[in-house]
Amino acid sequence: MTFQTERLLLRPFDQGDARNVVQLAGEYEVARTTLSLPHPYPIDAAYSWISFRKDAAKNGHGYTFAMVVEATQQLIGCISLNITSEHQRAEIGYWLGSAHWGQGYATEAARRVVRFGFEDLRLNRIFGAAMTKNPASAAVLKKAGMQHEGCFKQHIRKWNEFEDVDYFGITKTDFLHN
């Protein structure tokens, strides 16, 4: 499954992307504001992660897309929906190499993936989280149509520091009326 936006191609990852994942997701500035990205990012972990995400898609548990700039075919990041089928909801997550921050790529991808979730997957709700120290990520969620639903104080531990996390969400009803 592949999607096209104004400037991006959103496509599944393949094993040939592993080195780019290591380079982009393993950047300190990228990894420090995500729950699960390690720094440094080992190549074996990238290969395993790509396989895991392919299996998730095959089994309907989630869909992960490489963000590729169409004009240059350069992989710049990742966006995903992790699905909880029983509740017809998904969590959106993303990361973007720091050289590509501030250019609207994450927002462009998030809007398309939210649309995919509601129109194709028939989800009822999509939510996302952003560490409060990452206001740019919160802005992406808002621009994708989500509303701030609350702040969970010291909700996660990243590199032995407890971090506050803001949650955002949108329902299918809200999506259809926007």
Image (cartoon, rainbow, N blue to C red):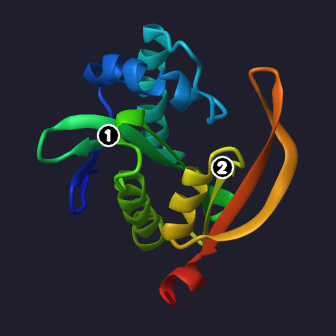
Residue 44: image location, x then y, percent: 46, 9
The residue drawn where x is 25% and y is 20% is 16
Specify the amino acid type for callout 2.
Ala
Using the image as rendered, state which of residue 31 and residue 124 is in the foreground. 31
Figure label count: 2
Specify the amino acid type for callout 1.
Pro
Q: Answer yes or no: is residue 91 visible.
A: no
Residue 118: image location, x then y, percent: 48, 71
The residue drawn where x is 43% and y is 10% is 43
Residue 126: image location, x then y, percent: 59, 64
- Label ID, residue 130: 2
Rendering quarter of residue 169 = bottom right
User: Which residue ends up furthest to the left in the rendered image?
Assistant: 71
Tell me the element at label 1: loop
What residue is disc 1 on?
Answer: 12
Using the image as rendered, state which of residue 138 and residue 70 is in the foreground. 138
State how far apart marks 1 and 2 are (Cα). Answer: 23 Å
Give the foreground label among 1 and 2.
2
The residue drawn where x is 41% and y is 73% is 119
Tell me the element at label 2: strand
